[in-house]
Amino acid sequence: MERFLFVYSWLSALTEGRFFRRGFSGLLRLSAIALTIYLLGDAIETWQKLLSAEEVSDSILLPMLVQLILFIAGYTMIHLILLRAAEIRSLYDPRYALFEIITVIARLMGELLFVITITITVITALQTLGLQSGILLPELQNLISPLLAQSSLAWIIGTGALLGFMLLVSGYLASELLEMVMRLSRNSERRL
């Protein structure tokens, strides 16, 4: 009788982890689509600002480089999100469904923070080379200009690379710690 009720199939999906795997995988795919739309909209808006500017010749170099960097970083992030979404969808252990999902998400967070940090570092390094532009994020440029004036290019690149590497390592470390807890739990179960 309980097989005819919808609650049985819903509880079965929860217990086996299908609901969580599909849900988190779907959320990651939706976030990849949203990021794609945002990056395309940002690129279109930036190009409209560039084409409407009076002096196009000298001030176009930095926005073009930044858009290229953002395109590469955005593609990398979208690809990472889609790969991790597929990995979550293919997980199989019903006993530790959420643990496995959180393990993959921890790894993904480390990878995304690494890409974001390296992207910000490269764009900031371009700012220190004297490539100034009033079109590209003028509020951010006014905020960081005093900091950039006191920092060398090597210090900015070195600090950004080190911070990115530390974020990547911390994401993978969190993932491995969760995997270790799962292995310990599996090994401590009684053998039938």
Image: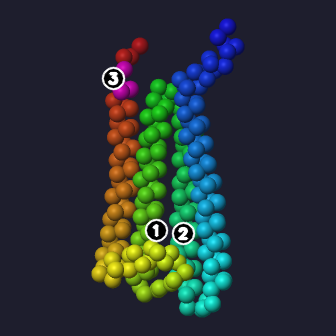
User: Which labelled disc corresponds to residue 119?
Assistant: 1
x then y, percent, for residue 177: 34, 40
x then y, percent, for residue 160: 36, 68
Q: Mark 1 is on which residue type?
A: Thr
Nearest to viewer (mark 2 / mark 3): 2
Observer-nearest residue: 12 or 58? Answer: 58
Answer with left or right where residue 174 lies relative to residue 4.
Answer: left
Q: Which residue appears at 55% of the width and 81% of the height?
A: 135
Task: Give the vertical position of 3 relative to 29 (above or below).
Answer: above
**Which quadrant, please, contains the N terminus?**
top right
Majority SS type along the magenta span: helix
| Neighbours of disc 3 within 10 Å: few (<14), some (14-19), many (20+) | few
Does residue 82 appear in this view? no
Q: Which residue appears at 55% of the width and 85% of the height?
A: 61
* Contact check, label 2 and label 3, Cβ < 8 Å: no
For label 3, the residue is: 188
Question: Residue 53's image quarter?
Answer: bottom right
In the current view of this chain or complex, which residue is farthest to the right? 4
Q: Which residues are magenta?
A: 185-189
Answer with left or right where residue 76 lies relative to residue 180.
Answer: right
Observer-nearest residue: 97 or 51? Answer: 51
* Contact check, label 1 and label 2, Cβ < 8 Å: yes
Total count of labels: 3
Secondary structure found at label 3: helix
For label 2, the residue is: 70
Q: Which residue appears at 45% of the width and 40% of the height?
A: 102
Secondary structure found at label 1: helix
Task: Give the vertical position of 15 relative to 171 (above or below).
Answer: above
User: Which labelled disc corresponds to residue 38?
Assistant: none
Q: Mark 3 is on which residue type?
A: Ser
Q: Mark 2 is on which residue type?
A: Leu
Answer with left or right where residue 169 lies relative to residue 73.
Answer: left
